[in-house]
Image (cartoon, rainbow, N blue to C red):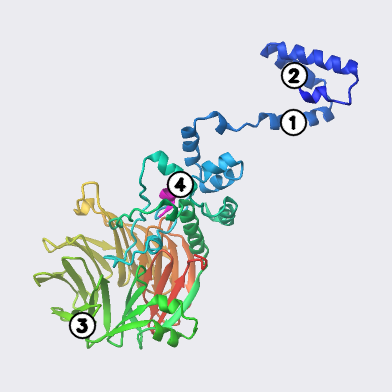
Amino acid sequence: MPNNSLKNSTDLNENEKSTVESIYNLYSNASSKVRLSLLVAIMSTSCTAELSSLSFQVPNKLRFDFRRFLPEEIAFNTFAYLDARSLCRSAQVSKLWNKLANDDLVWKRMCEQHIAKKCHSCGIGLPNMSFLESLRLGERAVSSNTSPEPVKLQYQFEGDESERTAKRQKREHGPSSEELTSILDRDLNSVNSRKPSPSPPLQDPKDLVPYKKIFSERLLVEQNWRHGRYSLSTFEGNPGGVRCLQFDPRRALLMTGGYDKTIRVWNTSRFLNDTNPGATAAAASALVRVLYGHTGTVMALRFVGMTIITGSADTTLKVWDLKTGECKKTWEGHTGGVLCLHFDDKILVSGSEDQTVGVWYKTTGKHFTLRGHTDAVTAVQLVKSSRVFSCSGDATTRLWDVETQTCLRVFEGHNAPVQCLQFSSEPSCHGSVEPDNLVGTLITGSMDGTVKIWSVKTGECVNTLFGHVHGIWCLQFDTLRIVTGGYGGTVRMWDIDTGEQLFKIDGHSAAVNCCALTDSEVITADDDGKIKIWDFMPKKL
């Protein structure tokens, strides 16, 4: 029988209805081949108005929800392959699609594709911000390293998989799909390691943060980075100028050394929460401790846990206890000022104006020097207690073997003193640190105004970044970006993969001597003693 629209039609008389019913029955009982031929014939004799009416009805007939015809597992896997924008739009289709598009496991996969690395599909990488999760879990443990670490995405639940899925579905979702779509759409034109942290303790699922919220928070921060949106805080550091700094975002702890021969310890959370805009007043409220003991400018410092080691123009290295502020040990060995240092739990390495790299065994006190540079050693980095990178005023960077005390490779390419370097280590599949198997990224900055990215395996420069007009004094990088500071008082941000300059920050009136990079902040300090915190975290987070 004809459908209800034909039965209830008031525009047809009885004879016309009978005719339509006969045609309908004939069409319904015909074979597929006949029906197709009949449709083609009808369309060929139809006028424009009739075809137009038909065109409005056909699309609706062709639409169907494929989800209703698939097992739940297959439908779930289909949604797991969508990008974030498609997921948000899918969540607005129907209640059934909304349930799948907002599933926590789907967004977990999305986080794993983007956090601390760039997604191969969309080209977007999101900051780690693991410290944010630590704060949510109430962890205030002292970090043994302040370099970026992989975010721990594996939350733990009790019960079997079906029970865990049921609990996830009862949890409160993150931002609405409309809100997250809006975030993504705003950035439409812009889309073109150390050991993992300990697993968080078992918690009630309802207290855990949904992965969708984790993703959206990091997306907001990433967009601020990409578009150069930040809030700026300034305070007075060491009188006379700041020469070195290090920042621990987990403890909001900043340490600086400078021309005043002191090491200053700051609690940046006090400063950031201070309503007084005055730089001097803010510094007074944030200053926690001042360490005295050096008789020359403090040129280098590094802290891990409660241990601080500093190097000075007075040619000494000192070990301090952060808790008490006492100097526990002094090492002497260089004949020139100590310009840089780096250490792990076994070895301390230092670079000096005497053109040597000093190697100190922390437990035994044994000390020897690595010779080869023909000018002051300006930066050093220790890798796995067996390799040392160093750069110098002689415009070269060297890779040393601690065991044999020999130079393994010389990196040449800069035309002026190399002032700074950083190496990010990625061990080979066999865990070897032989030079041919030492995998990672080496980046150097020079007084010639360029940043160079090197192949550790061949010693060749693979990319050179141009932008600074004056010399570069400092640099830091993570898995997504590079930050550099220079003699001209500018700070520049670069994409680590493409080498493209993302933006330039003008704010210092003197040379930027040192910088620190976190997932959401850049901290810089200059020769005038000004310390600036460029915060890319949205205030509502």
Badge 1 vs badge 3, beta-carbon distance below 8 Å: no
Residue 376: in sight, yes or no?
no
Number of the front mark, 4 or 3: 4
Residue where numbered disc 1 is placed: 57
User: 248 left or right of 508?
Assistant: left
Q: CA distance from mark 4 to mark 2?
A: 50 Å
Q: CA distance from mark 4 to mark 1?
A: 40 Å
Residue where numbered disc 3 is placed: 326
Please, what is the dominant secondary structure of the magenta stretch?
helix
Q: CA distance from mark 1 to mark 3?
A: 83 Å
Badge 4 vs badge 1, beta-carbon distance below 8 Å: no
308 part of magenta stretch: no
Q: Which mark is residue 39?
A: 2
Residue where numbered disc 4 is placed: 168
- The magenta segment is 106-115
Q: Amino acid at mark 3?
A: Glu
Return the x and y of residue 174 as percentages of the image width and height. Answer: 51, 54
User: 461 left or right of 166?
Assistant: left
Q: Amino acid at mark 4?
A: Arg
Q: Amino acid at mark 2?
A: Leu
Q: CA distance from mark 1 to mark 2?
A: 15 Å
Q: Earlier in the sequence, mark 2 or mark 3?
A: 2
Instruction: Report the front residue among 76 and 172.
Output: 172
Badge 1: residue crowd in 10 Å (few <14, some 14–19, many ≥20)? few
Badge 2: residue crowd in 10 Å (few <14, some 14–19, many ≥20)? few
Q: What secondary structure is marked by label 4?
A: helix
In the image, what residue occupies the spot 50% across and 72% down? 231
Return the x and y of residue 15 as percentages of the image width and height. Answer: 90, 15
The image quadrant that residue 342 belongs to is bottom left
Number of the front mark, 4 or 1: 4
Return the x and y of residue 349 as percentages of the image width and height. Answer: 19, 70
